[in-house]
Amino acid sequence: MLHQALHLLPTLAAAPPAHADSGAAATPGGQLLMLVPALCVLAALFSALSGPLKIRSKIPGYFSVACLAGAFVAVLLTYLGHESGVKIAHGFEWITFKWGDGPGQALTGNFAFYVDSLTLLWMLFVTGLGALIALYSVEYMADDVGLGYARYFFAFNIFVLSMSCLVMADNLLLLFLGWEGVGLCSYLLIGYFYKKPVAVAAAKKAFIVNRIGDLGLVLGLLATFVAFGTLGYDPLFAMIRAGVDAKGAPIADSWVTDVIPLLLMAGAFGKSAQVFFYVWLPDAMEGPTPVSALIHAATMVTAGVFLIARMYPLYAADDDHMALSLVAWCGAITALWSATIGMSIFDIKRVMGYSTISQLGYMFAGLGLLAPTGAAFHTLTHAFFKATLFLAVGAVMHGFGGQLDLRRLSGVARMRGFGIVGLAMLVGSLNLSGVPGTAGFFSKDMILAQGFSTPASMIEAPQAIAWVLLLTAGLTAYYTFRAFFRVFTGPVEYLPGDDEHLLEHGRHPKGTTLAEWHKQHGHGHGHDHAHTELTGVAARRAHGRKDFDPTTEEFDPHPPGWAINASLVICALLAIAAAALYFVKTPHAEEGGWVGGMIERSSAAFHSPHEFNLLGITSHSAMYLVSALVGLTGIAVAAFLHAPKGWQGLFLGSRDTAATSRADALTPRLGRVARWARAKWYVDELYDWFLVKPLRGIAYVSSWIDKLLVDGLVDAAGALPARVGRVLRPSQSGVLHGYAAGMAGGVALVLLLVLIVLN
Amino acid sequence: MMLASLIIVPLAFALFIAVGPERSAARVSLVGMLATLGLSILAAFAFDWGFGGQFQFGMSVDWLPGLGLTLSLGVDSVALMLVLLTAVLGPVCVLASWTAITERVKTYYAWMMVLQAAMIGVFAARDLVFFYICFEFTLIPMFLLIALYGSTNRMRAATKFFLFTFTGSVVALAGLLYVAWHHAQTRGVWTFEIDALELAARTLPPHVQALILGALLLGFAVKVPLFPLHTWLPLAHTEAPTAGSVILAGVLLKLGTYAIYRFVLPFAPEAVIEYAYPLAVLCTIGIIYGGLVCWVQTDVKKLVAYSSVAHLGFCMLGMFALNHAGVTGSVLYMLNHGLSTGALFLLIGMMYERYHTRSMKEIGGLGARMPVWSTFLVFFVMASVGLPGLNGFVGEFLCLMGAFQASDAWGAGLWGTTPGDSTVGGTRGSLGPWVAAVAGTGMIIAAIYLLYMVGKVVFGTLREPPGHASHADHHAGDAHRAAGLPVDLTRREIGALAPIAALCVFLGVYPKPVLDAVQAPVERTVTTIAEARGKPKFRPPVELAPPAEHAAEGAHP
Amino acid sequence: MDLLTNPIVLYLVIALGAVGVCMALPRRGVSPQLVGGIIAAVAGGLIVLVLSLRAARQGGPDAAPNLFFYVFAAVALGAALRVITHPRPVYAALYFILTVLASAGLFLLLSAEFMAFALIIIYAGAIIITYLFVIMLATQAPEAGKEHLLAEYDTVSREPIAATTAGFVVLGVLTAMLLGGGAQLPPAPAADPSQTRLAQLPRKIEQSLRDAGCLKGGGALARSSLGDPVINWSDRTVQIEGPDGSRTWAPMPDGLELSNVEGLGFSLLEDHPGSIEIAGVILLMAMLGAVVLSRKQVEHDEELKRRRAHQLADAGGAVR
Amino acid sequence: MSDALTLAQQGWPAAFPAVTLAHYLFVSAAMFTVGLIGFLTRRNLIIMFLCTELMFQAAGIALVAFGRYHLDFSGQTFVIFILTVAAAEAAMALALVVLLFRKRETLSADEWTEMKG
């Protein structure tokens, strides 16, 4: 792929014609985007080689940042030069071959990019956030300089590479390459702390759950090929626009528009952690936080949204929008479901994880409610504010030795050096809660409003979906600020965690040796969220001491350095600025601002119907009020239950230690519900009991069958001659004459018989 | 002469090794393998890839003209690829045995060279008898490699391997001889030229073809191995020395698939059409069953061995899809499986050399101890799982694609209905998609068991066998030094793995040359099948409806 | 009742032979070997007589009587009987040589000259000599008059009656079958199809033509473009080329035919090339096997050691 | 030699009856029977092998006689193979006998019954 970069200039001049037979508007161009994979490969190779080359510095990190920034610039330049229409940048022929001239007799899986505004929208935040988070990682991973650094940045760059392939692919096959590639990187990065069994299990789980969805995607690909005879978007969209499949049969009410969208949906749900597939994402929080920010919040998990947005023409081509209804309902249910879990668990990073699932549910609901613009906008804003949140949480984690339990941290924002982190967290939380004026507010509003406007004739019970989403919005505001109030406000108080970095380098806070430390903690120290006992917190209180001097303590919470702060600031600013995009007027779309313009110019364009109009109020203006109200209520409840006294808690709170709050009094009253919610509704256990264990049982049975039945039959067949031999053995006395006599007698007998017969 | 030299050179080196001193055997063998590799690369350059469907480098020497026996050689692009695969794995195997084999070194390497010659002979043969001789002759060196250099249960494994595969191929021989006899009956001449027999076999009535199919499959499916006939494989793999496993997985199994590709499909096309669906179901069962059995293994090598059962299920599924995509995928799968699974066995062998155990109960978390080894392991596991961008994916996807579309290739006689015309919506239209969907779960199971293995062996907390407890600190233990091996891989070992890894990446990122090269032979096979169906191969091309005017305004009402 | 065709007579004669052979077999104590031998000879003679009479009855005028056959057959069978009855292995082997010689004589009568001499050279000359070596290596022949020192396994035969019965059932059945046919041997080969192979021996033809005086004045055998002689088999003429290049037909000389050795050679190398390869492989393997076996270091096994120890103990006991 | 041969083939004196194929076959059968009986009764390994050679010899006579009868050389050709097999057998058998003799210093076949199953 490196040669692509080298030959960039010539190919810019003379790109080969692609899909000459499609007759659509695609034109060659956008070769500049070839720089993106090229730079990623370059950075990945450099990072990988830095291991064997024994580079023990941050150079690979900075190199990656530079390359990713370069990639971002390439995307930006392409965007600036992009007007409308579709350009196809041809790289090389990947899995391309032909065995006939008819439809469906050639497989075209080129390494080529389909450049339209949807692609560019996604690529802008993928590469932009990629570069930003790479910068953050440079500092975050500083403890692992060396082999770990090489591993980390290799996977990181390969991730951006795969994500670019996924987003920019000109055909579904290349999309699948990226799809699996991001899965691999996700696997490698979740399992980055490979000595932690929890991380390894989480990585495995993520990969396998994704694979299950991928099966749907593969089958969807195959069905697409069968129906349309191609996997390239350009000819595909041409046929869908014409409403026919490869044989010219109408698709509107055929199996094509039912089966393929459902299969693709399965893939999308797997990657984006929806409904049955969500279980991998919370566990994925075992990875380093920048990874969670980039992969498991901002980019990779939105691949499912992207896939459906990309294939939106096919979804929309169905008469009864069956698949879209399903998408919407699944999204809404997931949103609510994971929000309930987010409300009850104590691990702030996992709270963010569940919140991501919930917000992804929003996006899918948006897609399903015929608001692709809203979904895309929410994806964009979510990418920024969720990245901000994760980076902030990561900074806390980094500073406190991996501590994530919100009952063991308090008043972090007031500690020296953590100001920026607190502010960034606040920005992110406001966005996530949908406080009026923030980007998150507008993007969420677009989806909600559409939900109340979409006629029930197009989607099954859209209003119900919208109510569910509205409820979720309130819960979201609650759990977001629950985490914020508990960790960032209140008395300064902390208990350091058991960060993997510290473990690796043998310097544990208590100054104990590794072995002793292990003895004290045993295993399973990865998931503090499940712990309810809070030993030793009291010993480490530092009530109201703003001048808390860390040097007198064994543990030194180190505040973030410039790289982390810089990326936090940029990220937070972007999250704020994203709101402005809503007000950008474009000639391409009536609403949705800049994103609306981008979507309208792409294949995902869909003119959503507006039917709601009560007393002259459009659904949007109604939603402004309602969702603002819901969001603020959620915050207020959070403040009442979790906030400290005084202005920090909006004068509602009463908390004065890290561990206790008003919520503690409330929880027992909820009885089992709270316990079950905290146990994540026992979904993992259910899966374990009803899926994993039976499957493993079948595997054991198969193994026994193999050993006893299949192999046993073979062995029995092999033993048959031996058995027969054992029966006949006594006749073999070993005396030569015996054999000879037998033979002679036999011959005599046979001859006699012959004689008798002949006569 | 090109091909003859490819067979003669390894044999000559085998002779050198046999008469030469014990100490230089490994080096001579390496030189011999490299010479073979060089020759095969030369052959690849001399080959006219534009005419890949024709047999090139043909040569024919009369052997016993009275019986119509000749020594005729020739390769088309598929065979040449497999020759290349064999040649590539040769030096790798020698490197893998460098320190592992310490006794009877001469015998070992001499047989290895003989094996190499026999395997190349199988792919290069254009005469049935010569093919069969080479096919069977591979058993003897392999038997000895397992029986003399294997681990504890080696004698049983070797015997089982030998008897199982030999019994099968005797039946296959009967089938092949019947075809030759039929040729002699109808044409009046005895010949064993594969081309002539191919034409003769197709004139057989369908029920005889079915018998031929059964006989050939019984012989060749054992070698593949197809689902119920696989039990020799795990045992042979676990007991064989590393190089033996590599060759076994890399090339010997391909002898079976190649034989099916070369004989079963062209010799009995009508019967294949008839029985392809049940066979595909069998492959599917093999995929899932093999995968599940993998999952509960504790012996790493056995796990990878069972994974071959699952993987070759995909390969055969593509083959029995009987359409272009499927057969192409199947051919690619042969190459890819040879590379990635061969490399996995190599890696496990390296681990075994260091720890003398392969049980996942005793070892774990080796990522901390052997980063380079672990990197390679993860890499090849990913190739094996079928990650796009690495070699495994291309073949797997095409096989699935073939199966998905296979409905209209599969015969209907057995099921009493007429073949569906379109793939989905025809009478039997949904069979292919269902088979593909069920087989597709094999992808998931592959991820489960391979990642399970990686999770146990590479990741997690470091666990080493009791004898190696002294390595808990960060320097090499005495046991390693005793074996002359450092903790992590040596340059020799990396040298053995790196070329395979490079090939994996190349074939994954740019499979185009291979795809193009195999088109012509696959075309030939698929056309044979299509002709046997008595239907025109190509459906008349349907005009693409031009995009209507109003389409631009929006797809929805 | 025709004695010649009545099977009962035949079976009685066969039974007589069996009794004779049984008596001739070595046994402990008094063995009526000479008597047995005579009885067996008489029985054999009777059967041959029956055969001959039948032949004479059926035979045409050209039925060629042959004294040599009777002599060779008698010697061969007599010597064979002695092979299996002589208690001393060396003598048995020597009698075997006699059998071989007599068989070679029979071969000569059957116009298989090459095989006759090959038999003598290979069998009598090589194989039996090897046997003799081994016998001498393995047994120590006692002097005359001390026959009781012969090994027990040489002097006592096992199950003589059963064995003889089995053998003579076979012989009886075979003979009964033989009596079914009495085909004459055809005359010595004159113009059998294999003679066309002469065409592959141009120099032999040329030599015989020259000897017959057909090639005078520097004439030569005419050759086709492939170098073969031009022969018309139907009237047995061959084309010859005069010194001036003119071609004429000349009759083939009378004695010109494929000799036994030539015929055998053609048969061996043209009709059975595969078999000769296999024979070669068998010989090679046998040689290898013999080498491997004889190189093997053997140790006296437990059985022998035990026996030796017994003998020593007995001897010691006697001394004491 | 050719004179003697002609004499032998023409038969002399004429008092003896003609010789037919059956004569030779009877000689062959009788020799085979003698060999068979010898093999069954004798207990010396070497003699037993000699007896097998006798049986070979008998087969050879039958083959040559049939060959003569059919005017075909194949019969004689097969005698060559019989010779081959006999030679090979002699080599192997004698090597084995020597081996066994060295081990137990006896030629009795009854001593060797270890090969029973």
Image (cartoon, helix red, strand yellow):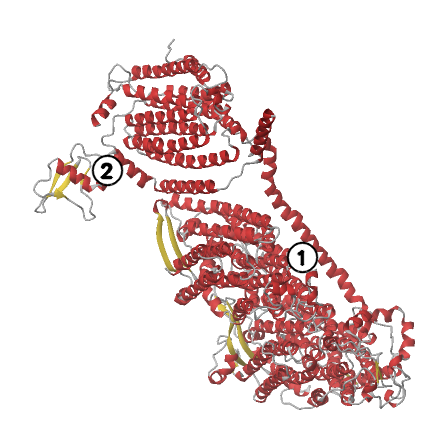
Q: Relative to A748, is A709 on the left or the right? A: right
- Farthest-out residue, top: C1
Q: Secondary structure at mark 1?
A: loop
Give the CA distance from mark 1 to mark 2: 73 Å
Q: Position of residue B275 (x, y in %)?
A: 54, 51
The answer, for residue A101, to whether it is visible in the render is no
Report the residue marked by disc 2.
C196
Q: Position of residue C130 (x, y in %)?
A: 39, 33
Residue type at mark 2? Thr
In this rendering, is residue B68 above or below B448? Answer: above
In front: mark 1 or mark 2?
Answer: 1
Q: Tell whether label 2 touches label 1 (CB within 8 Å).
A: no
Q: Position of residue B22 (x, y in %)?
A: 48, 57
At 68% from the left and 51% from the top, the residue drawn is A704
Disc sitting over residue A758 in the figure: none
Report the residue marked by disc 1.
B297
Q: Secondary structure at mark 2?
A: helix
In this rendering, is residue B390 above or below C208? Answer: below
> Are there few (<14), some (14-19), or many (20+) residues within 10 Å of tag 1?
many
Q: Considering the image in quadrants, where does the C terminus of chain A appear?
A: top left
